[in-house]
Amino acid sequence: MKYPPPHHQDNNLDHMIEVIKTYPLATVISVENNEPIITHLPLILNDAGKLIGHIDIYNSQAQLLKDNKKITIIFTGPQCYISPSVYSTTQLPTWNYIKVHIKGTVKAIDSKEALKKSLITMTEFLETPDHKYVLDPDNKRMEGNLDYIKMFEITIDSWEGKFKLSQDKRPKDIELARTELIRANQASIVAFLEKVF
């Protein structure tokens, strides 16, 4: 049997880009001396098809985000447990999820002007669609922090879309699993926040 099952792989680039746009907080993984170094950062896909990010200079991973270093990135979409009780047919328990795995090559961007422009562009993207806040180019707080932020871009070498959404089930059960994914994500966020925040 082939793994991962082909019906759980989504090679549609538009679908993977939609995951990145909707869930931009990425798990960024570098390796040094056979040890993974992991940071969670928002990454934005620019018009040239490159991922753009910013990292605090005091983060140990910042030193690894330089020219020609290889990197792995994971974007995570919605996910949840699917109980057999959800389906209209007899099934086993499973977990449905959406992930996009990317391997790429990093390039450091040392220009302060490019960093400033990138911070403004990222803020504009993240404020979509309402744009309640606009990061002004003359923002003194931003100016004061430019020396403490490193900008980098990632050229994407490979994409892998993992969309495990009960595609191997009957159409009615696929729709029931979809409904449960929506319901469970909304309910679990409320329940979780009541416990920890």
Image: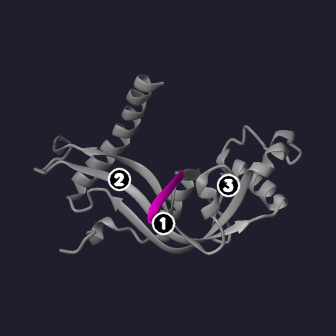
Residue 16 shown left or right of residue 146 in the figure? left
Q: Could you tell me how many numbered marks the image carries?
A: 3
Which mark is in front, 2 or 3? 3
Q: Please state which of the two labelled residues, at mark 3 or mark 1, is closer to the viewer.
A: 1
- Rendering coords of residue 112 (x, y %): 83, 58
**Lower sequence index among marks 2 and 3:** 3
Tell me the amino acid under the disc marked 3.
Answer: His
Q: Residue at x 10, y 50 (%)?
A: 90
Residue 193: name its quadrant: top left
Residue underneath mark 3: 54
Please tell me which residue lies in front, 45 or 176.
45
* Residue 189 within the magenta-colored segment of the rendering: no
Q: Secondary structure at mark 2?
A: strand
At mark 1, the secondary structure is loop
Secondary structure, magenta segment, majority class = strand
Q: In the rendered image of this protein, does residue 160 appear above or below residue 119?
A: below
The numbered mark at residue 97 is 2
Where's residue 31, x and y in %? 49, 64
Q: Position of residue 39 (x, y in %)?
A: 54, 52
Task: Report the magenta residues as a range.
Answer: 34-39
State the mark number for residue 151. Answer: none
